[in-house]
Image: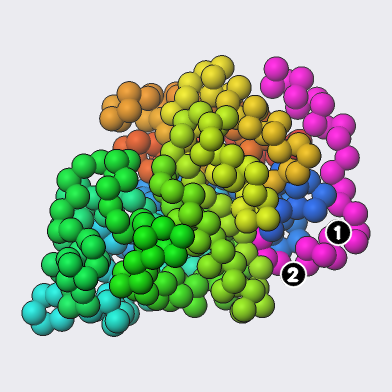
Amino acid sequence: MLRLLVLFLAIVPTVCARGEEAAEESGRIRPSLSHPFYWNYQGRDVLLLGGSVDDNLFQLPGLAAHLDEMQEVGANYIRNTMSDRHDEGFEVDPFAQLENGKFDLKQWNDEYWNRFESMLKGTAERNIVVQIEVWDRFDYSTDKWPPHPYNPVNNINYTEEESGLASRYPNHPGANEQPFFFTTPQQKNNVTVLQYQQRFVDKLLAHSLKYGHVLYCIDNETNGEESWATYWADYIRRAATDANQSVCITEMWDDWNLAGPQHRRTLEHPERYDFVDVSQNNHQQGQKHWDNFQTLRSRLLEQPRPINTVKTYGADNNKFGHTSQDGVSRFWRHVVGGAAAARFHRPSSGLGLSDPAKAAIRACRKMESLVNL
């Protein structure tokens, strides 16, 4: 099948019309005008490929060397959650911590934001596209919530009673018990907490909107209410418009079935979501993995948009039971099947930038030298 596909693609014209090239010369990443299932960056249609050792890369010590390692093998795409959970010991929080140990949500921790700015600058210099996830539900439940700055017991800005936030949410975030994700006007209209969420996003955008290589994803694998995602997508869009910049936004839904109702929220609203992320398809295997992706892609034929898969699961001895071969196979099925971006998930759930991941990325770039996907 692959050989036939390569022969077919080799005869497909890939030269952009001159008028379309001119329209894309702004340099900011955007869907290609000539091949709208793919991305255009700095006036060129590009295939985004990646693999990295962590998700919140801006927090990583020695980031510059890791970015150089990516660039050397042809990787040009990273995932960057804005997470501050202290998994490895080197992470810092976005808010200032006072002498009494509590956080002030009205004051920033400059180190957090300096790290974020350094990541944006370093990736821009290397032409590596950044897909930011603004919120990650795993930061706000189980053992990650008790020490979190937004937890009312840890800050000076609101109490449990004022905020409606409890000190513990021990269940998996998929239970949707955390009121943090119900604050917007069409939900609980919790202005006590929302004002600090808005302030955080404003600060994020003050850094990121200056750069043209950034994509925006609202959440990590959410099954939350549509209103939450809609609010933040529109909020980011308005901020970009006010700054006279264009942005591309999506939401990552948790449903492994890409034909499910959660994904309709993205597919049926191209005016809100400029691209689609189907990372959760990477829980599927074999023919089902391929068919799931192709069914979704066929639904976009009348209004094509890039389809990204920023998390490709699969590594030996991981908690999901998926093997390293599963990870490599999923990566190739998405690339050959028409994905605009494919990245290996971080260890131990994915191959990261391990030798098998590097080999796959190099091989894909070699294929690109022969066949322009």
Q: Residue at x 23, y 63 (%)?
A: 164
Amino acid at the residue labelled 1: Glu
* 242 relative to 317 in the view: left or right: right
Residue 226: image tag = none
Residue 86, can we see it?
A: no
Upstream in sequence: badge 1 or badge 2: 1
Residue 120 placed where, x, y %? 49, 68
- Magenta residue check for 24: yes
- Residue on which disc 1 sits: 20
Instruction: Report, in whole angstroms, how far the alpha carbon at label 1 lies from the one at label 2.
Output: 11 Å
Q: Helix, strand or loop at disc 1?
A: helix
The residue lying toward the viewer, choosing from 301 and 192, is 192
* 62 relative to 151 in the view: left or right: right
The residue lying toward the viewer, choosing from 298 and 190, is 190
Q: Residue at x 76, y 20 (%)?
A: 4
Residue 262, can we see it?
A: yes
Q: Is residue 129 above or below residue 125?
A: above
Residue 155 placed where, x, y %? 18, 73
Q: Is residue 180 above or below residue 149?
A: above
Q: Quadrant of the N terminus?
A: top right
- Magenta residue check for 151: no
Packing grade of label 2 (10 A; few <14, some 14-19, many >=20) is: few
